[in-house]
Amino acid sequence: MTVLARAVVAVAVALVGCASTPTFTYTEGNLGNIGVGDSRERILAIFPSKITNEEVTRGMTIRAARKDASGTLIEVGEVLLLNEEDRYKLTPYWFLFENGRLVRWGRPEDWQAFSASYQIDFTPSAPVFLY
């Protein structure tokens, strides 16, 4: 392989690496755009994943889904939001949906008592710090 070919490969690898670095453009301020009863699709549209040549933005992911004994579909979505006071800290927020409608949202540590009635049993993400 020639020196020029190696240089082209190295630049291409570097560009792919930069394009796949996740960025977080959603902040806790985005929570002002949501309300109880909003559809799952609307919430996912507020926090979409975005992939462009310049960035990869991680949006909401559905972490758990199941039907309860009565047939109600229960889903929990998670999105990492930039903290308003500390722009280097990502805070996870959970969103609870029943049959496609938003019932509740908040930080995982606020859900302990509430989650028992929904039998939600999974480990919340720890806050992430960006350096």
Image (cartoon, rainbow, N blue to C red):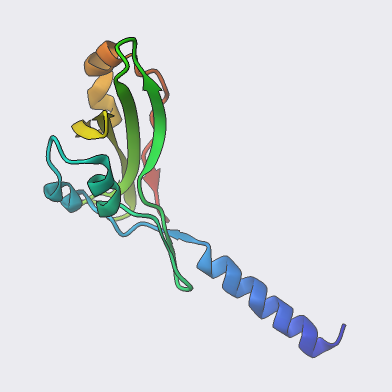
Q: Image point 39% across, 44% down: which residue?
A: 128
Q: Quadrant of residue 102?
A: top left
Query: Quarter of the image containing the C terminus?
Result: bottom left
The outermost residue toward the front is 71
Question: Is residue 18 positioned above or below 75 on the image?
Answer: below
Q: Image point 78% across, 89% down: which residue?
A: 4
Choose between 96 and 25: the one closer to the eye: 96
Residue 118 in the image: state x and y as whole percent: 29, 15
Question: Is residue 112 positioned above or below 131 on the image?
Answer: above
Query: Quarter of the image containing the N terminus?
Result: bottom right
Q: Quadrant of residue 16?
A: bottom right
Q: Quadrant of residue 37?
A: top left
Along the horizontal axis of the image, is 68 left or right of 15? left
Residue 85 in the image: state x and y as whole percent: 20, 51
Residue 50 in the image: state x and y as whole percent: 40, 61
Question: Is residue 29 positioned above or below 116 on the image?
Answer: below
Residue 27 in the image: state x and y as whole percent: 24, 53
Q: Image point 71% across, 83% down: which residue?
A: 8
Along the horizontal axis of the image, is 29 left or right of 10? left
